[in-house]
Each structure stands twice: as structure tokens, then as C-alpha cells.
Amino acid sequence: MKHFLILHQVAEKVEVLSALSIKTRRVLKGHGNKVLCMDWCKDKRRMVSSSQDGKVIVWDAFTLNKEHGVPLPCTWVLACAYAPSGCAIACGGLDNKCSVIPLSLDKNENLAAKKKSVAMHTNYVSGCSFTNSDMQLLTSSGDGTCALWDVESGQLLQSFHGHTADVLSLDLAPSETGNTFVSGGCDMKANVWDMRSGQNIQSFESHESDINCVKYYPSGDAFASASDDATCRFYDLRADREVAVYQKDSIIFGASTCDFSLSGRLLFAGYNDYAINVWDVLKGTRATILFGHENRVSRVRVSPDGTALCSASWDSTLRVSWSFSTGSNYIFVLGKQ
């Protein structure tokens, strides 16, 4: 707890957050089973989601329109990601593959026919992310590895070995020239990797159960993790240590997903008790709780401009909160006013 107290001492003079009021503005319905993953397009408007129903759907989050629905041969599509250009999506799951699908302006085009397998693991694909271009894809897998692939040729460019159990999540460092990423898994470890060398450059072991999600702080100098031990933790990469734990005695269900507000002041964390807890990152206190989902929250993601929060759930829906009012705008871009 020593390091946790140090963070509180640093934040003692920071202004306390005013009361937060975040309301769901959109409920997206279209999947026939658990929604397992979602990702925002960089245009801040479109989203992709994947589900246990074997479908990947591209949405317009403003109008609720489904722009594309792509049926896949395998159910449990655990991972999906939007390409930086917005012209393609990637998805993978229990088929051990990660495929890239180019998107078309023609909504009637058969996108499934254009699907191209890029990555192949020896166990399920748990996560995927394009690097800073459409040409490279990073994947994590139940085979205990992460891998970097060339999208055009499907060639394995680099593999990352260091976890001793399933890797459940990965996140790329936010800088444009970012050559590092973080991964977390069932070995209760969060590992930071150099993409060029394949080396594990930092490792953190303080969770007491599986790490379900890892997410970089917006500055790239720290990251958060969400775990089945019912805590989220905050690690400072420069100090090479854990600096905060987000927990309450009343929270007994595992944390499945997390993401930061654009300023980094808030951490949104989805839990297996269907709630989203919103934490004040600096003070370590809970700012508010978001209710509405009727099953486990599988994914929370803040939009690229910080003005909206999307949550995906096993209740087969996605819920989007937009910052229409001054109050909720303050929530998402906190620290920029």
C-alpha cells in the first residue's frame, strides 16, 4: 500500500471531481448473442463489434444504422479492431485465426467473400490491433504468445514469448512512433514488449487472478489493468512499479475491461456484475457507477475524441453515452477545460 499512498499524497491538492452524470444516449441492438468486443473508427463515428453469434457488425453510432453485417464461419468472435484508415476491420476468435476484411461503400456487397486470413495461432485469438498503419496487425492468443503480422503477405514478422498461460489482452502504446505494447493474461502478469526486438522489457506481477484487460494511459507513460481479482491497478512505466489500486470491499466481481478518459483523469472499468465503475485515477476513489446492462460488461471504449463512451455486453447490446451537455463534456475531456 506504500506506493498507493504516495500517489494520494501527490494528488492531495488536486481539485476533487464534481458530481458526474453520464446517461446512455444510444442502445445498439443487432447481435443475436453475447457481444464480446468492439472498437471505434478514427472518424469518431463508426464502430465495429463482434459477437458469440459469429457476426461482425459495423455501426454508425450517430444514426444507429448497421452499415455492414459480416457472418463468419466460427462463433465466438472474441476480438475485432478498426484499421487506422477506416477502410478495413480485423477479427478473430475460436478459429485460431485473425482475418482482415476490407470495407466497401456498397452496403450490399458480400464482404465475407473478401475476408483474408492474416494471422494463425495454435489456440484462440483473444485480441487484435492494427499498428499505426493498415499494413501490420498485432494479435494475442490463448497459446500464450503475441505476434506481429504483415497484412499483405500474412507473414509472421515477430513473435513475443514470455507469458506462461493464455494471453487475454493487448494494447499498443499511443505514440505515433510507438514501438511498444503491453499484454496481460491468465498468468496474472502484465508484460511490456519492444515490437522491434521481440523482447519483454518490463513485467508486473501484483494481481491475484487473471488479467482480462490492459490499457495504456493517454500519455503512454503508464497503463491500467483489470482483473478477475475484482481490482484495477495502475502501473507507472518510468517508476517501474504499481502506483495505485482501484478497489472497494463491496466490489467482489471480476473486472473484465477498462479504458481512460481522454485526459486520463477517469478510468472506466466494466465488471462481471453488469456495472461500470468510474474511478478517479489520481485520488483512487470511485467517482460514480453506470448501470443499464443486464449481463457482464465485456468491453468499454472511449471514442478517439473523448466525447463518447461505448460499452459492449453479454446482454447482446452496445450502449453509447454521448457528451451532448456541458456537464458530460466535462466528464470525458476532463483536464482540458
Image (cartoon, helix red, strand yellow):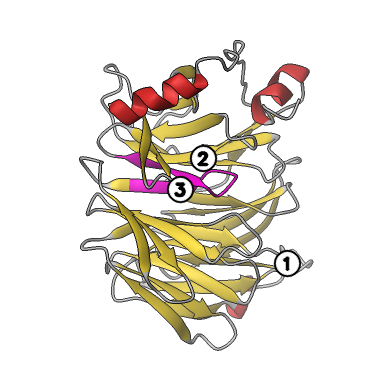
Residue sitting at 73 percent across and 30 percent down? 336
Three-letter code for the amino acid on which mark 1 is drawn? Asn
Q: Position of residue 108 (x, y in %)?
A: 73, 67
- Mark 3, secondary structure of its residue: loop
In the rendered image, the vertical position of residue 129 relative to residue 109, given as above or below: above
The residue beneath circle 3 is 238
| Residue at the (47%, 60%) spot, across then down | 181
Determine which quarter of the picture holds residue 193. bottom left
**In magenta stretch: residue 222:** yes
Q: Where are the magenta residues, as a range?
A: 212-227
- Badge 3: residue crowd in 10 Å (few <14, some 14–19, many ≥20): few
Q: Nearer the viewer, residue 246 or 291?
A: 246
Closer to the N terminus: mark 2 or mark 3? 3
Mark closest to the chain's N terminus, 3 or 1? 1
- Numbered label attached to residue 108: 1
Name the mark nearer the viewer: 2 or 3: 3
The residues tagged by marks 2 and 1 sit, at their Cα atoms, a distance apart of: 34 Å
Q: Is residue 257 left or right of residue 262?
A: left
Name the residue beneath numbered marker 2.
259
Tell me if mark 2 has few (under 14), some (14-19) or many (20+) residues whose alpha carbon lies within 10 angstroms of its own: many
